[in-house]
Image: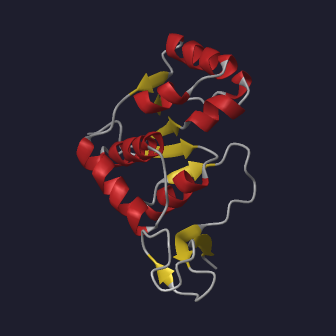
Amino acid sequence: MNLNKGKVVYVLDASFFINLPALQIPEGECYTTPLVVDELKDSRSSLLEEVMSLLRALKIMSPSKDTCKRVEVVSRRMNLDVSRADISVLALALMLKEEGKSPIILSDDYGIMSIAEALEIKFNPITTRNFKRIHKVITYCPVCGRTFKRKTICPICGVRLRRKLKLLK
């Protein structure tokens, strides 16, 4: 019998450490990645990281390269630009989910929340209240209206392309 099956665990993005007061540390296992630790710069967030490490509540793990690649594919498909640290958070949550745990990502990053939703991974915003589900980011030409993938200049008009969110209803 797998004792970890369905066990709720938390995967923490850098925004957790930056925005959350130290008194609101979630109970249970908390994970983050080395890339998130590298992002932490201000003293308050670094102090919280040290406290959680001392309490053995924070486990720093690297996700597998395969899981990172799978998250990158979803990110590209959704046309979302996310950092390597964001990819690592999502990949770690996906890896924990595949191990039978029930990860919940704690983040205020819209890109992370959108991709987590696509991967069917639970998330809780920290300070963001009105998260609207993002299906995809559309890159379009403001002159001719055509849409493109992975371009910055319209090949027809020569105008810099813009991005907009396509929201789910």
* Between 14 and 21, the one nearer to me in the picture: 14
* Between 103 and 130, the one nearer to me in the picture: 130
Which residue: 66% across, 16% down? 43
- Residue 13 can be seen, yes or no: yes
Q: Quadrant of residue 18?
A: top right
Which residue: 57% across, 76% down? 159
- Residue 29 can be seen, yes or no: no
Most extreme residue toward the bottom is: 144
Which residue: 34% across, 32% down? 62
Above or below 57: residue 14: below
Percent across and percent down for residue 58 are: 49, 23
Q: Quadrant of the N terminus?
A: top left
Q: Is residue 156 left or right of residue 61?
A: right
Most extreme residue toward the top is: 54
Number of marks drawn:
0
Q: Quadrant of residue 164?
A: bottom right
Percent across and percent down for residue 70 are: 30, 56
* Between 159 and 68, the one nearer to me in the picture: 159
Percent across and percent down for residue 91 are: 37, 46
Q: Is residue 103 left or right of residue 161?
A: left
Percent across and percent down for residue 119 are: 42, 60
Q: Quadrant of the C terminus?
A: bottom right
Most extreme residue toward the front is: 158
Which residue: 46% across, 66% down? 79
What colouring method underlies this structural image?
secondary structure
Above or below 60: residue 129: below
